Structures are given as structure tokens and as C-alpha cells.
Image (spheres, helix red, strand yellow):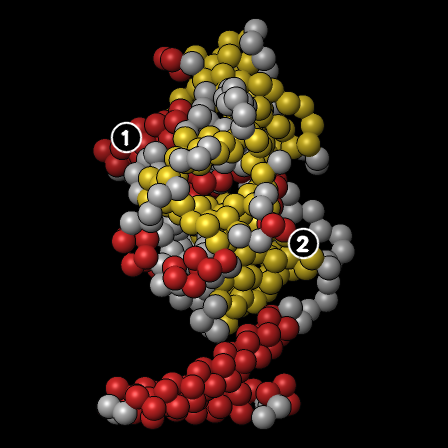
Amino acid sequence: MEIDKLSNEQIEEQIELYLDRIETISDHISETEDNSIRNVLRNQKGGYKQTLNLLYDEKRNRQIKNAMNFDSNSDINLLGTKWIGKFSPDSKKDSILVFYPDGVLKYEDISANWEIKEGKIILSINNGFATMYGRNENNKLIGNAVNIQNNEWSFEYKNIDINEVLKSFISKNEEQEAKINKNIENKILKLGKKWNLKNYLFFESERYNIEMCQNGLLKINDNIEANWFINNGRIIFNFNHIHVEYNGEILQNKIYGLAKSSEGKEWIFSGELISEVVKPENSRTLKIKSENKGFGLMASNNETWNNFKLLDNGFYFEDEEKIILTSVNGQEFKASKGDVPWEATMYNRSYDEDKKYYDIFYGRNPNGGQFLIYRSKSNKFQNEITIGVLNVKSDGITFEIL
């Protein structure tokens, strides 16, 4: 069967056909007691699954091609723009998109990123669970979206100003707001107190080093005093000496937000943690090479994932008994070289197969939970490790050891 020559209707028919075949043969496998027949049926089922995956891949590729079937716009500057609209026709309320630096996209409390590729806007939502393909037309962001469940839909957002964005963050429940504010304060102070703020007007411009001190005191470049506080779950920096308010949030271990002067000028900013960790003796530096958080029920939760990402530019130490990874905010991830406990083998169905190709080390997250470190047995990849939750090898962050 030449799948690429089938019509869309024929693709759907073949998907239904192979789903039925897999269900039928699964029933036969469970009913037969003859091992030789069961093995034949399992091989046949594997062939059906392989064909079904090819059909799904072809369907998804066509959906993506169709979603991107519009004229490119080579003159796009989205940095700092703010939009409101419905994510999908089924959405009950509007959502806000803010295009921050580093390809970070503000969308609800969900991990999201953006890029412009060949003049087309591509938004990745929830670690690729859904992908939106859009264009900027008449002050509107419009386009088509596809998710991994092969659903597709159209979307439309309109451009808004900073006041509408900030208004959306205001909470009507004082008790809930107080709880959120406390959680945010703990979260940012846990990451660190010293940050490097970058201002973006049309491009990266002036920078400030800030230190968040007790009782709301903010030190700017070590010699200017200002103040900071948490309001509506947002981090507020008041630069009183230049009459500017910075209104930000924590996204992917950085601070991103909107700034506004008393004269009405608006721009966006980002804040990067200034590491105060001293490099441990006999350690090497870690650098992220690739990452795969997974998605749905199999995805690593945001808190654990963000802790792992803090290992970027952190340190690697190894001796005969253990591996110690130190993050840029001083957390230590210790993994033993002994036997991996049964939980790891239970959660990782590929564990026995993985052991053929990787040395696997077990550890406990300093903030709770467990993790595994994989290191290839191949000499070619001896300077790489992958850290992830108790799941499959593909879900994790791969670091290069420099």
C-alpha cells in the first residue's frame, strides 16, 4: 500500500480498518493457549501497528501542511506584542498571549514557546501537544492548529495593550490571592535573590543587576535602593529613581514581564538568575544539549522539570560511589552507583533493554521525588548524561559534560 498516494478519505478508512484489525487480533491473542500461534499473532499485530503509525504520520503531515498553507510574511516583529482571543472554538474564555524574549510564550500557566520560521509564526503549546501556525494580518493573529491527537482547528487573536494584559492578572478572591502571592515569593527566593534584568525596546538594551533583600528592599547595581513586592501573583520591581514599574512572572526559571514608565512608555524585560554557586573541586560544567519533557500523563511535572533545567551551567562530580549534579542555585542531585530500586524498573518498562546500552544511576530529587541518570556505554557518548523522572529513556534532559 502506497500511503502517500491515498486520499484523505482513504487514509481515514485505512486507520479505522487497522484499528479494528488490532482489536480483533488482540482478542485472539488473549483467547489462544497455543504459544506458537500466539507468537505468530503477536508478530502480525506488530505489523498492523507499524502500518497504523505510518497512516497516522501521513495524516499529521498533511494536517501540518494544510495548517501552513498561507502566504509567508517576511516582515514580522512579534517581540513584546500582546494578544487576546480563543485558543480554539471550544474555549469557554479568552486567553492571552505575550511574546517574550528567548522564544518564550506566555499562555495561561502552560509551557509554551514561539518562533518565526520561513516567515510563518509557529507556536508550540504544552511541549508540542498542540502546534499553532499563524500569520499577522490586519492587526490580528490568525491561523490553524493541530495537536498530537490529530485534531485541527482555526484560531484568531487580536492585538491589545499592556493595560488589558495587567488587568487580566487581577484576582477577585483576596484569600486565594494571598496564598498565590506567598507561593510566588517562595518560588522566586528559592531560585535566587540576585538577577540580571535585560530591557527590550526593539532589541536588547540596558541591563541592571538587582538583589532582592528582606522587607521588600531592592538593590540596583549595588548602589541604588528601590523596592519589590508580590501582587496578584506577579513580581513587582519599583525603580523609583527613574519612575518605572517592572511587572513580571517566573517562566522556565527566568523572569519575564512588562515594564511601564510614568511617561507611558512600554517595553518588555527578562531576568536571568546570577549564580552564586562556587564550582566544587574536581567538578566539570554541565550544558544542556537536548530536552524532551514528554506530554500528557507521561510528562514530567513543571516543578521537577524546572529543577532539572537549573542544572544548565551547573556542575558534574563523580567518584567510585556516586554522581553529584549541582544546579546554579546550589541544589544537589545525588545519584548512587548501586542497584536501582524496584520502583525504577516498575515505572520504566524499557529498563531491561536500556541496561544493555546505558549505565543507570538512581537518585532522589532534593525537593522530593526520584530520578534516574543515564550514561551511554558507548565511548562516543561518555561525555553526555541524561537525567529524567522514573519513565522512559527518551523523556529527559541530555547534558554535555565539558
* Residue 104 coordinates in the image, percent (x, y): 56, 44
Q: Amino acid at mark 1?
A: Ala
Left or right: where 222 falls relative to 372: right
Examine the image and state in which quarter residue 58 appears. bottom right
Q: Dot 2, how many residues are within 10 Å of its Cα: few (below 14), some (14-19), or many (20+)?
A: some
In the displayed structure, 376 sits above or below 48; it is above
In the displayed structure, 285 sits above or below 87; it is above
* Residue 40 coordinates in the image, percent (x, y): 39, 90
Between tags 1 and 2, which lies in front? 2
Q: What residue lies at 72% left-to-right and 58% top-to-bottom?
A: 119
Q: Amino acid at mark 2?
A: Ile
Left or right: where 218 falls relative to 335: right
Residue occupied by mark 1:
178
Determine whether the residue tagged by mark 2 lies in a helix, strand or loop. Answer: strand
In the displayed structure, 92 sits above or below 320; it is below
Determine whether the residue tagged by mark 1 lies in a helix, strand or loop. Answer: helix
Q: What residue lies at 60% left-to-right and 50% top-to-bottom?
A: 379
Q: What residue lies at 30% left-to-right and 88% top-to-bottom?
A: 35
Q: Earlier in the sequence, mark 1 or mark 2?
A: 2
- The residues tagged by marks 1 and 2 sit, at their Cα atoms, a distance apart of 38 Å
Can the viewer see residue 82? no
* Residue 141 coordinates in the image, percent (x, y): 60, 57
Can the viewer see residue 362? yes
Q: Quick one: 278 or 206, which is closer to the camera? A: 278
* Residue 151 coordinates in the image, percent (x, y): 47, 72
In the displayed structure, 181 sits above or below 292; it is above
